[in-house]
Every structure is written in structure tokens, then in C-alpha cells.
Image (cartoon, rainbow, N blue to C red):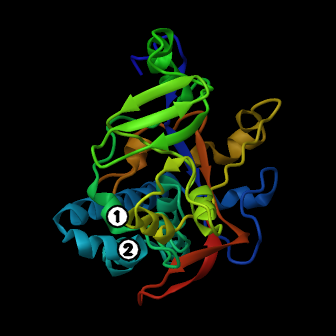
């Protein structure tokens, strides 16, 4: 964040966690008795701690696994075979088991991809994020809210490069000519450039569509890309990621009667700990949570049963 000292930012702190619904379609209904189903910190902390413990376990297993085996193993398979959920469940009251078994969906939020849908990490037609992804270390630092979003960081870094004319924006690339000497000639609307490497960020779906058109290569490459490249393009799968932003005229969650209904249900990030290693009771609750974590049955989700079966469940 030192890159943008003039931008406001705030670390994520408190969260309110709601139980998975048994019959209702939507659990979080502020202004109704449903809010009473928010989970107390001494339970919510271990629940979230269990999820992060599961992530830590995957990060430990992935780097020491055979790369080919890790690539062929989906994240969901790894979660199913882990004992972490069972170990935590043994210390939780029965009423929270359904919530715990649906919590692995939190990984989808972290990885921006469903556990059971198509992913670019797997070949087309095979669902699931891959374990190999977890061989990569996480970025250090806390989760933060950044004023104007994270694109401001890229814009700040690029500012001097653009001013020095080292980055050209709005420059249409018409043709990329490549040969065996690894010299690439890029023809653009603004002139000709040469380069040792070309990084192509044309969307995968566009590339696959172009390849599927009879008599067409993958513009703007000349000559057409070699078969090993086009085969890789056609083999990759991809899915859809949607974000929905809700903007309110005022922060209603800081007002009564809402605030008093969950004030004693706020769990701090520092208390995302496993059962037996401390509880939130030792720390004061935040006045305002940064996030609400709940479930809905309006969208299909999943729950991992104790026998390893993946069953339909509420959506986190």
C-alpha cells in the first residue's frame, strides 16, 4: 500500500457468520428474526479457522505432490479426502454441522472459480479447480479495502511508463508475424515494432471461436500458430465469474435496530482459530463488521458429507 499513500485503505476486520438454512430460501433477512441465527464468535471463529486451516493444508500438500498428479487432482477431491472437516466437526454442536459441511465453498470465493464447474486449469469438459494451483505461495499481507479499487495500483505503476511512451494505449494490433528466429514483427495502426516475445491476452473464448471457423487461422498471427499451440487453446476450459455490487444510500448496518442484533456476533479476523487454541471471548468485538457471510437455497450449492459424498446444499 506504500505505492498509493494518497489513497484511503482499511484492513478487513470483523465478520458476521450465519448458520446454513434448513428450509428458508434466504437466511440473511435484516429486520426479521432470521438475524438471530447469526453464529456466536466462539463458534464462528473456529468455523472460519477450519476453512483457513484447510487452505493451509492444501498449500502444504500441493508443493510436495507429483506435479502431474496434482494437476490431475481437483481441489474438491483434495477437500473430500482431508480429515480437517471431520476433526472440527467432532468439537462442534450438531446444529452447526450443516454449516461446516457447506463452508468449503468459501474456497470458491478465494479462488474466483466454482469447485464443480469448468476451469481453465482443467481440460475442456473436466470440471474443477486443480490442486496444482495451491503449489503457488499466497501473497503476503492483509485483505484490505482500497479506495477506487486495485486497478489504481496498476495505473500508478504504469503512469511514468506511459509518460515515457514505453506503453502505448489504444494501439490496434493488426498482424503479428513470427518465424523460427524468435523475432516477432508487430504491425499496428501506429507503426511497426519488433520483439523477442509476444504476450497475447485475447480472451480464450475468442481464440477458440476463431479456430473453429473454417478457413480461418487465429488473427492476427502470420503464419498460423503451430498445432501444439492451437491444440492447447482448444483443450482449455473456462467458466463464468459474475460480481454483483450493491450500493446503498447509507450504511444501514451501522444503525439500530440492525446493529444491536449482530453486535455480539462479530468475530475478528485475529480469532479465526481452531477449536482448542483460543476463542473470540478474549477480544473485544468490532462495532461494525466488514463482511456478512451467509447462505441461500435460491442458488445451487454443495455440502461435503462425513462419508465423503458431495451432496446438494445451500450456496455460500
Question: As displayed, is residue 42 above or below residue 152?
Answer: below
User: In the figure, residue 194 lies in which quadrant?
Assistant: top left
Q: Quadrant of the C terminus?
A: bottom right
Q: Residue at x 57, y 50 (%)?
A: 219
Question: How many marks are shown on the rendered structure?
Answer: 2
The percent position of residue 217, horizontal first and vertical second, equals 56, 59
Tell whether 50 sits left or right of 289. Answer: left
Q: Residue at x 77, y 36 (%)?
A: 247
Question: As displayed, is residue 195 above or below residue 242?
Answer: above
The percent position of residue 285, horizontal first and vertical second, equals 51, 38
The percent position of residue 149, horizontal first and vertical second, equals 58, 29
Q: Secondary structure at mark 2?
A: helix
The residue that mark 2 highlights is: 79
The residue that mark 1 highlights is: 54
Crowding at label 1, few (<14), some or many (≥20) Cα neighbours within 10 Å? many
User: In the figure, residue 241 lies in which quadrant?
Assistant: bottom right
Tell whether 148 sits left or right of 194. Answer: right
* Closer-to-camera residue (167/138): 167
* Closer-to-camera residue (206/290): 206
Q: Quadrant of the N terminus?
A: top left
Crowding at label 2, few (<14), some or many (≥20) Cα neighbours within 10 Å? some
The percent position of residue 146, horizontal first and vertical second, equals 54, 27
Marking on residue 254: none
Query: From this viewpoint, is residue 70 visible?
Result: yes
Q: Pointer 1 and pointer 2: residues touching (CB < 8 Å)?
A: yes
Q: Earlier in the sequence, mark 1 or mark 2?
A: 1
Q: Secondary structure at mark 1?
A: helix
Separation of residues labelled 1 and 2 (CA atoms): 8 Å
Amino acid at each position: 500500500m506504500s505505492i498509493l499513500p494518497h489513497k484511503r485503505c482499511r484492513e478487513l476486520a470483523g465478520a458476521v457468520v450465519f448458520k446454513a438454512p434448513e428450509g428458508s430460501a434466504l437466511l440473511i433477512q435484516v429486520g426479521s428474526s432470521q438475524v438471530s441465527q447469526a453464529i456466536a464468535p466462539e463458534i464462528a471463529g473456529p468455523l472460519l479457522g477450519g476453512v483457513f486451516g484447510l487452505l493451509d493444508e492444501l498449500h502444504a500438500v500441493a508443493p510436495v505432490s507429483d506435479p502431474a498428479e496434482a494437476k490431475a487432482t481437483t481441489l474438491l477431491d483434495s477437500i473430500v479426502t482431508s480429515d480437517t472437516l471431520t476433526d472440527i466437526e467432532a468439537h462442534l454442536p450438531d446444529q452447526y454441522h450443516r454449516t461446516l459441511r457447506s463452508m468449503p465453498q468459501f474456497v470458491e470465493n478465494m479462488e474466483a472459480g466454482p469447485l464443480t464447474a469448468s476451469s481453465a486449469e482443467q481440460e475442456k469438459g473436466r470440471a474443477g479447480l486443480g490442486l496444482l494451483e495451491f503449489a503457488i505461495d499466497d501473497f503476503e499481507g492483509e485483505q484490505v479495502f482500497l479506495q477506487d479499487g486495485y486497478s489504481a495500483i496498476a495505473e500508478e505503476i504504469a503512469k511514468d511508463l506511459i509518460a515515457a511512451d514505453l506503453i502505448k494505449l489504444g494501439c490496434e494490433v493488426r498482424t503479428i508475424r513470427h518465424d523460427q528466429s524468435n523475432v516477432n514483427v508487430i504491425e499496428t495502426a501506429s507503426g511497426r515494432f519488433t520483439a523477442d516475445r509476444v504476450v497475447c491476452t485475447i480472451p480464450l473464448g475468442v481464440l477458440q471461436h476463431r479456430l473453429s471457423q473454417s478457413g480461418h487461422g487465429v488473427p492476427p498471427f502470420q503464419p498460423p500458430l503451430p498445432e501444439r499451440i492451437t491444440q492447447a487453446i482448444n483443450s482449455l476450459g473456462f467458466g463464468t465469474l459474475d460480481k454483483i455490487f450493491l450500493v446503498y444510500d447509507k450504511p444501514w448496518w451501522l444503525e439500530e435496530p440492525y446493529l444491536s442484533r449482530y453486535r455480539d456476533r462479530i468475530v475478528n479476523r485475529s480469532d479465526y482459530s481452531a477449536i482448542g487454541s483460543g476463542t473470540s471471548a478474549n477480544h473485544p468485538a468490532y462495532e461494525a463488521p466488514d463482511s456478512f457471510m451467509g447462505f441461500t437455497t435460491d442458488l445451487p450449492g454443495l455440502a461435503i458429507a462425513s462419508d465423503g459424498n458431495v451432496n446438494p446444499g445451500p450456496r455460500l
